[in-house]
Image (spheres, rainbow, N blue to C red):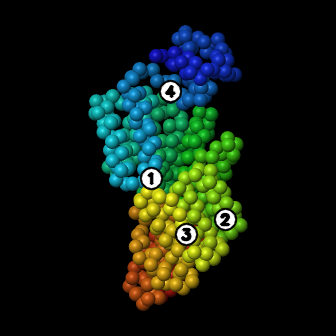
Amino acid sequence: MNIGEKIKELRKERKMTLAQVAGERISKGMLSLIENGKAQPSMESLQHIAKQLQIDVSELMQTKDNAEIRKLYLKIEPLVGQLKKEFDELIFDQKCQQIIDLIKPYIEEGELNGTVFEEIRLTEIYDLMHYYLKRNLSIDPFVEIVERYKQIHAYSQIVKGYSRIASVEFMVRHYEEAIEWLLKGESYISHYEAFVGEIEQLDLYYNLMAVYAALNNDEKSEHYLQLALEIAHEKKILYRVHDFYRYLFFINVMKEDGEKALEYLKKIEAFSIIFEDAIEVVIVELAQLIYLNNVVKDYNKVIQTTVNYLHLPTDVIKQMNQFIFGEFAYAHFQLKQFNEAMGYLKNIEGPKLHHHPLDAIRFYRSFAVRALCYLENGEIEDAKRDILYAMDGVKDFKDSIDKRLIINAYETIMH
């Protein structure tokens, strides 16, 4: 099937007329010639047609008819989507391996080395599964994938690829390198905005916001936050908005701006109702505990609060407990109930995965609180061990109420 035939097929599938697809960019007559193979469209015309059909231009560039590869792609993509809903680490790894086993024969036979969209995407997924399984943590495979997407002008995939490379760099705390990759993605948006999906734009701006926040660059972080919110509001897109509001909540808690923190707490509460997602509910409940502890300072109310886990997966509960128990312990500590605080903190662990500083600082605060509890019980060496760990963890973090608690605890214990 050539490009013209593919355009005609997609147009008819969507029940669109020649005039609707032609729009103002090309004439109906020219589009008819293209569909009938009597004229070759320019790249600009292809991009326009793809936009009218609401697809990526890469789909029109596929001239290779390989039913087997397409069938594999249609089977694999849903399996990748299911990974987002899997929180059991063992099952997650098994599903990654299942995907690898399905794609591997085609990789070994060299059947995915072309410039057809499905071939590139399957190769990308194959590399991604190896990354998830920690078999190859290099950015190199993903850089190569972006270059292959460039060959077929798949602009949304290019931007998404730069976001993924930046995420890999972020996980090893290469923040400056992450920014460089994200800015490359931003340059594609500035040149080809009409051909980059809003979802990919929001992801890129969210990542820029988050990485600049990790670098303590509030001005840049705020800039990309506003860009993202403008897109979300203009296009009426809910995607990522709750993440942005959650970020704003934590930022304003750190700044001790109670009024703003409450404003964004109400917004993330509203989103939890919209999404009807159990994990979102628990995240909101955690935010409420943080608000009570740091803004209202109603420690008794924190202690009386019951968190509803709603039958969450065990792995999620374990991760959330690290944060939730930290809030309960903090409240008991502020009320000088040191034994009760220790009860929540006896099994705390440092972050096994890399967390954004906004999250990580709560792990380190728990170690500082436990150190002060050890001090109250006369266990000086244990106190020193925990506070040194906490201080090392937050040394590069921006000033906040939690960091000040850790610094004050360090001065109390070590002097």
Indicate which label's residue lies in the foreground, 4 or 1.
4
Do residues under tags 3 and 4 come within 8 Å of each other at their CB atoms?
no
The residue to which callout 1 is attached is 169
Residue 309 relative to residue 271: left or right: left
Q: Could you tell which of marks 1 and 3 lies nearer the N-terminus?
A: 1
Instruction: Provide the secondary structure element on which disc 1 rests.
Output: helix
Query: Would residue 412 be visible to someone looking at this image?
Result: yes
The residue carrying mark 4 is 59
The mark closer to the camera, 3 or 4, is 3
Q: What separation in Å lies between label 3 and label 4 (alpha carbons)?
A: 51 Å
- Which of pointers 1 and 3 indicates the residue nearer the eye? 3
Residue corresponding to mark 2 = 261
Q: Residues within 10 Å of mark 1 (few under 14, many from 20)?
A: many
The percent coordinates of residue 260 (x first, y second) are 69, 64
Q: Residue at x 57, y 83 (%)?
A: 335
Query: Mark 1 or mark 2: which is in front?
Result: 2
Residue with the mark numbered 3: 306
Relative to residue 350, is residue 220 depicted above or below? Answer: above
Instruction: State which quadrant residue 371 falls in.
Output: bottom left
Q: Amino acid at mark 4?
A: Glu
Q: Is residue 8 left or right of residue 134?
A: right
- Under mark 3, the amino acid is Thr
131 relative to 407 in the view: left or right: left
- Which residue: 52% across, 15% down? 5
Q: Amino acid at mark 1?
A: Glu
Q: Mark 4 or mark 3, which is nearer the start of the sequence?
A: 4
Residue at screen point 65% across, 55% down: 270
Q: Residues within 10 Å of mark 3 (few under 14, many from 20)?
A: few
